[in-house]
Image: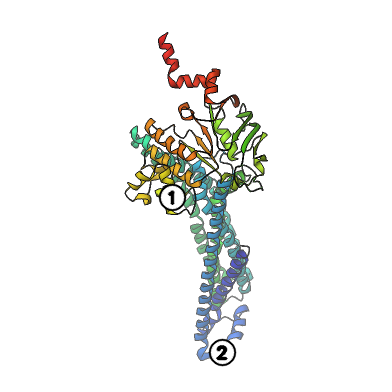
Amino acid sequence: MPWAAPVIIFLGLICAALEGLGLYLFIPLVQSMGGQDTGGVAHFFHRVTDWLPEKYRLASLVGALCLAILLKNVVGYVAYWVARVVDGRVAHRMRLRIFERTLWSGADYAAGLNKTDIINTLTGESWRVGSALGIGMRVAVVVCTCVVFVTLLLLISVKLTFLAVGVLLVGALVTQAVTRKAEAYGADVVEANRKFGLRMWESVDALRLIRSFTREPYERARFEDRSEDIRRRLLRLDMLWAIPGPIGETFGVMLIGALILAAGQVGGTGVASLAAFLAVLYRLQGPARELVGSKVGFDGIKSSLMDVFGYLDLTEVPAVKDGTRRFVGLQNEVAFETVSFNYPKADRPAVHDVSFVLRKGTTTAIVGRSGAGKSTLIDLLFRFRDPVAGRILVDGEPLDRLRLDSWRGRLSVMSQDVHLFNETARANIAYGKLGASDAEIEEAARIAGAHDFIAALPRGYDTPLGDRGVRLSGGQRQRIALARTILRDPDVLLLDEATNALDSFAERAFQTALERWAKGRTVVVIAHRLSTIERADQVIVMEEGEVIERGTPQELLSIKGLFADMHAIQTGRVAAAAGGE
């Protein structure tokens, strides 16, 4: 809103002019009450008001004074409203910008930030950006106000004005010297806020562990320490912000006393002019203190601004560049051609020279030891990252030429760590297809085998599931997630250790529902339990980022390689053979 600053400054000038006019009216007002003052400005006002009938002169001046102050407050209220609107919109846009960057930038953009850093920046420090803008505009208004008031003082008495400005400058220098640590204290508060947010988040996220280890007193003590630390830091900063007021008021009283003593030594300054001078000077002290206080305030929130803009700089570059071609659906296959990927500062490639084909309507299993590169392949397929070498083709078209929204809109992933929102069962399923009808949601739940237990909940589909679906069992959460995926109706379904957390009965029920729905669809399965991939059309075996075996489960068992060894360990044949010896 480029218009906002000029408007606010203009309104501030009008306020200052109206207030100055009101204060200036004290001169003719005192004259009308019998005060003797004929020098300089007083003579000018005497001539201006001389045409008014003496009978109505005093009432007219009082009315003009009241009208000037009334108009000043009306204009001031409008200026305050505009400033608050601007502050709110700036903070809102900044929060939205931060959230957008978080959504569309890389999830691990090598910034070293964790969830609490992002939340602290988004919910705490972003608000202070609007405050900084407000301080900046207020400083501009205050400067204009000071210029108007100093001009009025000069019109009354040049000598007294120089004396007053000199004393005020000394007061400002003293305040600056006392509050020079405001910036450092502000940085301390930002850091304390971050640590406090981390302590709070970890405690809430680990409630089950805390209770199982009976660590409630320990966690309470740690939380109390963080809270007390931030309380002390905030108190120190608040007390620093409060210093300019007392110093300014002390110097103001000293100044008024000095002016009264000096007025008799300055020719042409009568009672009426001195009264007006002191009134204007008294009103000038507020803006002067605010000017000094604004410097302290800005120093206090400077670290917050650096935190926000630093975060924006870190997330400026998206994880991947969007393509231009719209993807309408998988026709034949997805092909990995000599694909390689390196994580920053990693000792070796996560994926090296990998080639395989995912044919439409088939199931491909990717297996291997932990750290073999399986999850990296999923990230590359979703284009959370791009290969550093090689390419991925979708029906012959390079994946990076496809629009991200249209490509990812035809994919769906399920993992053992199912994320459910703290919403109703209906809302969690409908997340797969926003705007889905109740009939579509219930049909998806029936196919996933979730309808019966959802219907048995206290409020059926409208029952809140709690944070991350805490009110459901592991198998029930998986079926809710499957219903969400079914409603999404993807071309390619990726299962990342989706059944690892389930017992045998829950796993079998989930597999049955999944196989019934996934028939004829393209499925990619990452699994440690080899029993879940017995019906896969092909198995890709990974080792240290490379494909070392490929074929059907039966073919791989026959060649007695890594897959056969893993299968033997899981089925107990190795243990049985050892016992037989």
Q: Is residue 229 visible?
A: no
**Secondary structure under badge 2?**
loop
The residue where tag 2 is placed is 52
Q: Is residue 191 depicted above or below 15 in this figure? A: above
Relative image position of residue 500 (x, y in whole percent): 44, 31
Q: On the rendered image, what quadrant is the C terminus found in?
A: top left
Q: Can residue 424 be seen in this view?
A: yes
From the image, state whether disc 1 or disc 2 is nearer to you.
1
The residue where tag 1 is placed is 441
**For the residue marked with disc 2, what is the amino acid?**
Leu
**Secondary structure under badge 1?**
helix
Q: Closer to the N terminus: mark 1 or mark 2? A: 2
Callouts 1 and 2 close, C-beta under 8 Å = no
Q: Is residue 184 depicted above or below 133 in this figure? A: above
Relative image position of residue 398 (x, y in whole percent): 67, 40
Q: How far apart are marks 1 and 2 (CA)?
A: 83 Å
Relative image position of residue 521 (x, y in whole percent): 53, 39
The extreme top residue here reads 581
Q: Residues within 10 Å of mark 1 (few under 14, many from 20)?
A: many
Q: On the rendered image, what quadrant is the N terminus found in?
A: bottom right
Camera-side residue: 365 or 98?
365
| Residue name at image x 49 percent, y 39 percent | 518
Relative image position of residue 360 (x, y in whole percent): 58, 38
State the mark number for residue 272. none
| Residue name at image x 43 percent, y 48 percent | 443
Camera-side residue: 94 or 445?
445
Q: Is residue 253 depicted above or below 193 in this figure? A: below
| Residue name at image x 45 percent, y 41 percent | 482
Judge from the rendering whether residue 532 lies leftward or rightward of residue 453; answer left or right: right
Q: Residues within 10 Å of mark 2 (few under 14, many from 20)?
A: few
